[in-house]
Image (cartoon, helix red, strand yellow):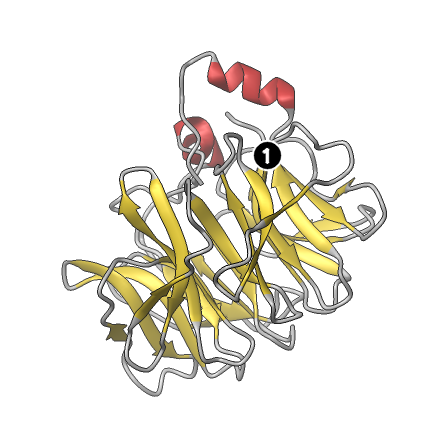
Amino acid sequence: MLRFDVYSWFPGDSPVCISPGDGCYFQSSIHPDGDHALFWGGANGPARIWRADLDGNSCEPLTPADTGARHPSYCANGQRIVFVSSRAAKQQPELVEVIFGYNTSGAPRRDLMLHIFSMKPDGSDVQQITEGPVQDQRPTLSPDGQQVCFVSIRGGSFGLWIAAVDGSHQPRKLETPVPVYRPVWSQDGERIYGFTVVKGDRHQVGWVSPRDGSWHPLENDDEGSTHGPFPDPCGENLLIHSNRHGRWSMYELPLDGHTPPRRLIPPGFENALCVHPTRAKNGAMTFDSIPDGSWAQYNQHNRSLNY
């Protein structure tokens, strides 16, 4: 199984490993205030959601050991978390040994039913948002906490869907001209960022209007595959990871659409694979990385990396 670790990174300091270090933990989501972060994974068994302090001194699971959970994301004020889980499905949950044995994107098996839930930051007050024979993924809350956008295959077609958190209306499909992946809401609620497949391995980030579904690519994301958009709290950049220069690395992509992206290089990670950057209002960041020894063992089998 490929190993991933999650790191915190304060401006001017060296990164600190905040995950347990005994398995695959990735796709972090930092709290808006920058004192702790969420991520998912595990050493074995069903994947769980974890909460860790950024100083690396505390890490604990928020979800049960007998049900699978993934894709945690904070709302704008940090008071609720949305995530997906198989806890409502009468199926065996996926094991991390299987999820990350051959697929570094963490994609679920095709027949696994996943629903969206919300909870408080301490793991209490769990509420189910979506239901039915569906596979919902990558939830992101609107800034007012009233709506959740996610990707799903419903009615035989893949797309972005928006649902009311309180269940007051059925999920509606956001009709877009291209398939959009990894949605994340902007701070002002006027955009939903994501990425699309342009052709083959060329993936480009942009944004969707939550009102009419129109797609607006960011032209300064002009090469390679770019994934994992995360709005910088300053409102001027997207944090992304991209293989535009070969190895997967983290960048700040200006939202002006023309200024070139700037690579972010944590001290000691100059030659390391670094993905899934997130940043809080105080400047603290989190990201994921693969230890060199784990990648060397994984690469012996000529497996590819896809995030």
Percent of width and height locating residue 6: 66, 42
Can residue 43 be spotted in the picture? yes
| Residue identifier under label 1 | 4
- Which picture quadrant has residue 53? bottom right
Can residue 86 be spotted in the picture? no
- Farthest residue in the front direction? 258
Q: Nearer the viewer, residue 118 or 137?
A: 137
Percent of width and height locating residue 50: 63, 51
Position of residue 23 relative to residue 196, above or below, is above
- Which picture quadrant has residue 249? top right
Which residue appears at 42% of the width and 48% of the height? Answer: 222
**In this picture, residue 160 sits left or right of residue 293:** left
Label 1: which secondary element: loop
Q: Nearer the viewer, residue 186 or 92?
A: 186
Percent of width and height locating residue 22: 65, 31
Number of labels in the image equals 1
- Which picture quadrant has residue 213? bottom left
Give the amino acid at mark 1: Phe
Locate the C terminus and report the quarter of the image it occupies: top left
Q: Residues within 10 Å of mark 1 (few under 14, many from 20)?
A: many
- Farthest residue in the bottom direction? 168
Which residue appears at 42% of the width and 60% of the height? Answer: 218
Q: Nearer the viewer, residue 56 or 198?
A: 198
Which residue appears at 33% of the width and 37% of the height? Answer: 201
**In this picture, residue 68 sits left or right of residue 275:** left
- Farthest residue in the left direction? 156
Percent of width and height locating residue 210: 36, 78
